[in-house]
Amino acid sequence: MASLPQAGVRRGRFITLEGIDGAGKSTHLGFIRDWLRAHDIDAVFTREPGGTPLGEKIRELFLAADTRVSLEAETLLAFAARQQHIAEVIEPALAAGRYLVSDRFTDSTYAFQGGGRGVDPARIAALEAWVQRGLQPDLTLLFDLPLEVAAGRMAGSRTLDRFEQEAADFHQRVRAAYLERAAGHPRFVVLDASRSIAEIQVDIAAQLQRLLERA
Ligand code: ADP
Ligand code: MG
């Protein structure tokens, strides 16, 4: 599955964006795109579930409000889409020396299916080991904010998907699971997303600069 390293090409960097719905991931993706372009860095932008033709079909089922799915099947769908995404998009981009920025990745499965639904994290870890074979992001930006602030920002924006329709205590567990993961993995940077967009982007730029300078 993993692409062979290309001679003379330094492997690219893998950046993931995480957070509850309404945290600002899509908003800041545009800023990251502009920042990388200004620094002449070739980057691929993608999302989960999705990022491939198969993955986008899975995404539709995954998010549709009328999908009836067990928590185990939901978890497996996330990893089915992820395996295809890694094989078809992520690994080839990194092997070619490109940066790859994904709006959500495996931390979302730990947060939503693990924290939110109660799937045993050991089961998620087993699927992670099988599907990712050691692949991990180099940097994970966690946009953290109180649920009420996120909900207020999303109010009236569009029809809510299957996860957005969940009750407040679900989103509270998702947020807590994210913070717990962040505490255990140094690749995470937790950003206070309740601040203004401009303030948050000062921090994002500093993190991108650090990643760029990292040996
Ligand atoms: P996500 O992709 O994480 O679900 P979005 O980027 O779509 O979140 O942001 C949700 C809404 O909140 C959008 O309307 C966006 O313009 C707004 N928003 C995002 N970040 C901020 C911020 N720091 N301050 C005020 N509004 C924001
Ligand atoms: Mg978004």
Image (cartoon, helix red, strand yellow):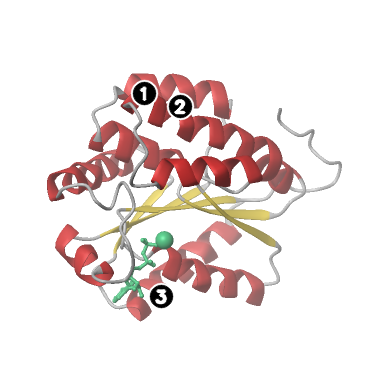
Seen at 65% across and 55% down, the residue is 99
Mark 3–mark 2 Cα distance, whole angstroms, equals: 37 Å
Residue at the extreme right of the image, as rendered: 7
Amino acid on which the number 2 mark rests in the picture: Leu
Q: Is residue 38 above or below residue 44?
A: below
Q: Is mark 2 within 8 Å of ligand 2?
A: no
Q: Quadrant of residue 120?
A: top left
Task: Tell me whether circle 2 and circle 1 mark residues in contact (CB < 8 Å).
Answer: yes
Mark 1–mark 3 Cα distance, whole angstroms, equals: 39 Å
> Where residue 5 appears, x then y in whole percent?
79, 37
Give the secondary structure at mark 1: helix
| Mark linked to residue 192 | none
Mark 2–mark 1 Cα distance, whole angstroms, equals: 6 Å
- Mark 3 or mark 2: whose residue is earlier in sequence: 2
Q: Is residue 203 above or below residue 196?
A: above
The residue that disc 1 covers is: 72
Seen at 38% across and 37% down, the residue is 109
Give the secondary structure at mark 2: helix
Label 3 Cα neighbours within 10 Å, binned few <14 / some 14-19 / many ≥20: few
Depth-wise, is mark 3 or mark 2 nearer the camera? Answer: 2
Front residue of 210/1: it is 1
Amino acid on which the number 1 mark rests in the picture: Glu
Q: Quadrant of the N terminus?
A: top right
> Where residue 199 appears, x then y in whole percent?
33, 77
The residue that disc 3 covers is: 202
The residue that disc 2 covers is: 76
